[in-house]
């Protein structure tokens, strides 16, 4: 299962079962930027943060976020760090929560700022 570093993330096998999808399809979605995935240093196993899903489906905004990240050369762990950072000076929530609030443009701008 996931480590403490990525405690909010799910292994590809679990995710494939949950989405009733072939694990190869999950991997293709990651490569195409439809899903964000991270790996522990030295590991070959991808972990998929659970916050990029709503009602068991990937958020459509994820593809736009991964595209923006790739345009400026951010890797998966850097995107994860940005999206899991605390919001605001007083730390009220996490950046990824903006996606669930419909504030995709704000998240894209934060990612572009690196």
Image: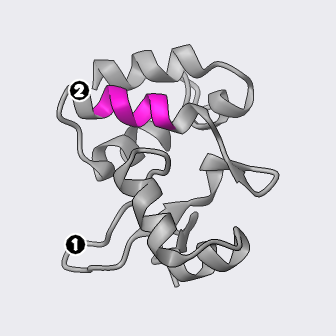
Circle 2 packing at 10 Å, graded few (<14), some (14-19), many (20+), is few
Is residue 95 visible in the rendered structure shown here? Answer: no
Badges 1 and 2: C-beta atoms under 8 Å apart? no
Above or below for 82 versus 90: below
Q: In the rendering, at what x and y percent does residue 20 appear?
A: 71, 73
Label placed on residue 41: 1
Circle 1 packing at 10 Å, graded few (<14), some (14-19), many (20+), is few
Q: Residue at x 66, y 35 (%)?
A: 97
- Write down the quadrant of residue 43 in the picture: bottom left
Q: Residue at x 53, y 15 (%)?
A: 106
> Which residue reaches farthest right?
55
Judged by its main secondary structure, the magenta piece is helix
Q: Is residue 65 magenta?
A: yes
First of labels 1, 2 by sequence position:
1
Q: Residue at x 41, y 21 (%)?
A: 110
- Between disc 1 and disc 2, the foreground one is 2
Q: In the rendering, at what x and y percent does residue 80 appear?
A: 40, 47
* Residue 77 shown left or right of residue 59 in the figure: left
* Count of numbered circles in the view: 2
Task: Report helix, strand or loop for mark 1.
Answer: loop
Is residue 64 visible in the rendered structure shown here? Answer: yes
Q: In the rendering, at what x and y percent does residue 39 appear?
A: 32, 68
Q: Is residue 2 magenta?
A: no
Q: In the rendering, at what x and y percent does residue 94 appear?
A: 59, 37
Label placed on residue 61: none
Observer-nearest of 44 and 63: 63
Residue stretch rendered in magenta on the structure: 63-69
- Which residue is labeled 2 in the image? 71
The quarter of the picture where the C terminus appears is top left
Q: Residue at x 59, y 21 (%)?
A: 104
CA gap, disc 1 and disc 2: 23 Å
Above or below for 44 versus 39: below
């Amino acid at each position: 299962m996931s480590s403490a570093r990525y405690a909010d993330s799910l292994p590809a096998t679990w995710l494939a079962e949950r989405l009733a999808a072939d694990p190869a399809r999950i991997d293709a979605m990651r490569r195409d930027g439809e899903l964000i995935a991270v790996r522990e240093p030295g590991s070959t196993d991808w972990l998929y943060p659970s916050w990029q899903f709503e009602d068991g489906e990937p958020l459509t905004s994820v593809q736009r976020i991964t595209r923006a990240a790739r345009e400026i050369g951010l890797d998966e762990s850097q995107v994860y760090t940005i999206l899991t950072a605390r919001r605001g000076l007083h730390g009220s929530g996490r950046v990824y929560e903006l996606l669930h609030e419909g504030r995709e443009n704000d998240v894209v701008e934060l990612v572009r700022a690196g």
